[in-house]
Image: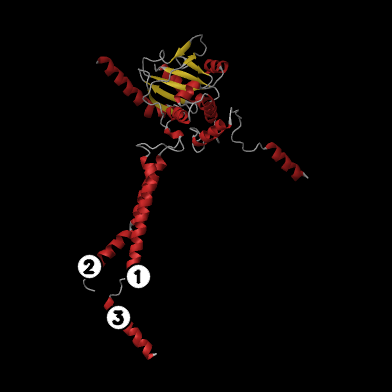
Amino acid sequence: MIRALLLVASLALSGGALAVIETYEFEDESLRERFANLADELRCPKCQNQNIADSNAPIAEDLRKQLHAQLHEGRSDGEIVEYMVDRYGEFVLYRPRVNNVTLVLWGAPVILLALALLVLRSSMRGRAQAQEGTLSAEEQARLDALLADDEERA
Amino acid sequence: MHASEPRHRSGVALKRLKLFLPLGLFLVLGGFLLVGLRLDPQALPSALIDKPLPSFSLPALGQERVVDQGMVTGEVSLFNVWATWCVSCRIEHPFLTELALNGLPIYGINYKDEDAEALRWLDELGDPYRLSIVDAEGSLGLDLGVYGAPETYVVDAAGVIRYRHVGVVNELVWAQTLKPIIDELRREQRAGDRS
């Protein structure tokens, strides 16, 4: 009985891990969708491994408020992202833009894949060479003769 | 058989060399990780470095007037983002007071705070600020890219942001980081005045 009471009490007292507390009203569904997308893509400057949709930090709350206000002012996604980058730097983008600094970041997977393919090709060629070519035609003929000889004796 | 021997030998050497590939990869990776260990992941360069102070028009704390970005410059100064709800601000407060007593102009940005609380805090702990800008909504904070108090900006004589320090300003931060920057900016300013 006590256990059951404790369970009920603990369930009642725990608020649950609600990420976003405030609710926003949207004029139409497309705005709501864009809000969700942008909040997902923008990184919280304070709690660095969360986007602003998930973060409880006051700064994330402020940025969500800004995002909501600017969407209703009719700003485009690009303008809003620009606004955030102007203030918080490229850091706020979970999907960094391609520029001189991030070129390595974007290029690395392609380069690594190319390297992997090269390694794969050279190792396959090595294996193919090991399988054939070990015997010359002359040696093969001798081997065949020997085998035939063997069979005759048996 | 004999003809193919030199090729065979170089093939062996190549194979031996390949054995060191994992070691090489390990060293490269280890080097990156070692550097990574020493980096502070919380250290974020401000997006506003070498840009002028954002424009604002906000009341001065405890005064009837409104201040803007133009009237608070003219010499190398610090802009310190503070609030009464910010625990670390209380820690850095005595050191800021000391800096102000030594003649460094410090302007406060009272970030998302209550005026009455802020005035009481300055009354109790002393006021190191030339003036405090009331940023109750955090709009100036947002334009500055503030993501938590305390933050301290070094602003040069022309009103351009030259450095941002996130966290408490103490003797160590002052001696190692802020003072060299400020000294350099003052030299620049003097050189500019002469020419």
Question: From the viewer's perspective, is the residue at label 3 or at label 1 nearer?
Answer: 3
Residue at the far left in the pictured view: B3
Count the labels in the image: 3
Q: Name the residue under label 1.
A: A131
Assign a secondary structure to mark 2.
helix
| Position of residue A127 in the picture relative to residue B140 (left or right) | left
Q: Where is residue B11 in the image (x, y as percent from the top left)?
A: 27, 64
Is residue A152 visible in the rendered structure shown here? yes
Residue B73 marker? none
Seen in the picture, residue B190 relative to A76 is either above or below; the reply is: above
Label 1 marks a residue whose chain is: A
Question: From the viewer's perspective, is the residue at label 3 or at label 2 nearer?
Answer: 3
Seen in the picture, residue A17 relative to B185 is either above or below; the reply is: below
Question: Mark 3–mark 1 contact, CB under 8 Å?
Answer: no
Q: Which of marks 3 and 1 is nearer the N terminus?
A: 1
Q: Name the residue under label 2.
A: B6
Q: Relative to the observer, which residue lies in front, A61 or A112?
A: A112
Cα separation between marks 3 and 2: 26 Å
| Position of residue B32 in the picture relative to residue A74 (left or right) | left
Q: Where is residue A4 in the image (x, y as percent from the top left)?
A: 75, 44
Q: Mark 3 points at which residue?
A: A141
Q: Residue at x 31, y 62 (%)?
A: B15
